[in-house]
Image (cartoon, rainbow, N blue to C red):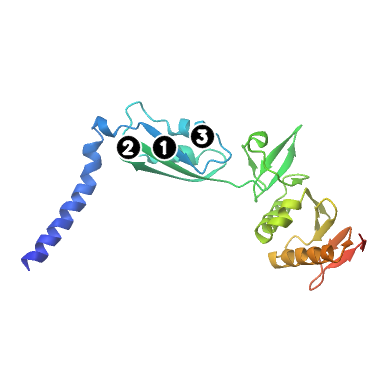
């Protein structure tokens, strides 16, 4: 019984120490922030994230960084952030950025948009992504592109542009076009690529594949290469 009380007491003391230690160490110069490591920043400049931390000159790794996390989370293009520490003086900032899915005209330039057709503040020239161009920020087009990327990487990489034709979606893959319904599932997109690869193996070229109709993929403009 006495041993149980000793174990319980040790757990309580450890818990109290865990709570109190940050309060004590915040005043110890040894634990001042000396280095900041940022991970996950593919599009945003690291300096933008570091500036958003708004750290004081005497910031300590045991400080409460709730406000700093809120500042970074408020940056356009940031979906999530987590701030951790490595003793004695390193802050680890992990960010999750919104993923660009396409380029869209805006005035006299192109801007990056995500799967919801929201404009992103990332500089296309800096990040240089090879992405399809959409006529305008259209959530139907970007949703189709998002499914295409998840369905088949080769399919998505070959798409140079996406557009609407009334209620349908047309994807331009350079040598051929793909017609889809806005709600086309990934399984259908994979089947389209299976057909395209099979035709290529047979030495056939074509102008269009049409997957708008249930259970079939129509090949148009087919001829021997």
Quickly name the residue at label 2: 61
Considering every residue shown, the one lying at the far top of the view is: 57
Q: Secondary structure at mark 2?
A: loop
Question: What is the crowding at mark 1: few (fewer than 14 residues within 10 Å), some, or many (at least 20)?
Answer: many
Please identify the quarter of the rendering in which residue 150 is found: bottom right
Q: Is residue 96 visible?
A: yes
Q: Secondary structure at mark 3?
A: helix
Which residue is painted at 87% across and 65% down in the image? Answer: 219
Sequence order check, earlier mark of 3 and 2: 3
Sequence order check, earlier mark of 3 and 1: 3
Quickly name the residue at label 1: 68
Q: Is residue 107 above or below residue 207?
A: above
Left or right for 18, reference 197: left
Please identify the quarter of the rendering in which residue 169 is found: bottom right
Question: What is the crowding at mark 2: few (fewer than 14 residues within 10 Å), some, or many (at least 20)?
Answer: many
Sequence order check, earlier mark of 1 and 2: 2
Q: For the residues carrying marks 3 and 1, which lies nearer the camera in this image? A: 3
Quickly name the residue at label 3: 46
């Amino acid at each position: 019984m006495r041993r149980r009380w000793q174990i319980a007491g040790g757990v309580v003391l450890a818990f109290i120490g865990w709570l109190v230690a940050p309060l004590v160490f915040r005043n110890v110069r040894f634990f001042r922030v000396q280095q900041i490591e940022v991970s996950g920043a593919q599009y945003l400049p690291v300096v933008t994230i570091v500036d958003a931390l708004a750290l004081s000159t005497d910031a300590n790794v045991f400080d409460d960084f709730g406000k700093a996390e809120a500042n970074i989370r408020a940056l356009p293009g940031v979906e999530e952030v987590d701030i951790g520490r490595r003793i004695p003086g390193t802050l680890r900032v992990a960010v999750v950025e919104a993923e660009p899915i396409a380029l869209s005209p805006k005035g006299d330039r192109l801007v990056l948009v995500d799967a919801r057709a929201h404009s992103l503040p990332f500089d296309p020239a800096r990040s240089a992504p090879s992405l399809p161009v959409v006529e305008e920020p259209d959530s139907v087009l970007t949703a189709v592109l998002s499914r295409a990327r998840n369905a088949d990487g080769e399919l998505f990489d070959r798409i140079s542009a996406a557009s609407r034709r009334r209620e349908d979606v047309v994807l331009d893959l350079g040598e051929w076009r793909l017609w889809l319904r806005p709600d086309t599932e990934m399984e259908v997109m994979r089947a389209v690529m299976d057909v395209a690869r099979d035709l290529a193996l047979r030495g056939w070229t074509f102008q269009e594949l049409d997957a708008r109709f249930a259970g079939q993929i129509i090949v148009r403009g087919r001829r021997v290469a």
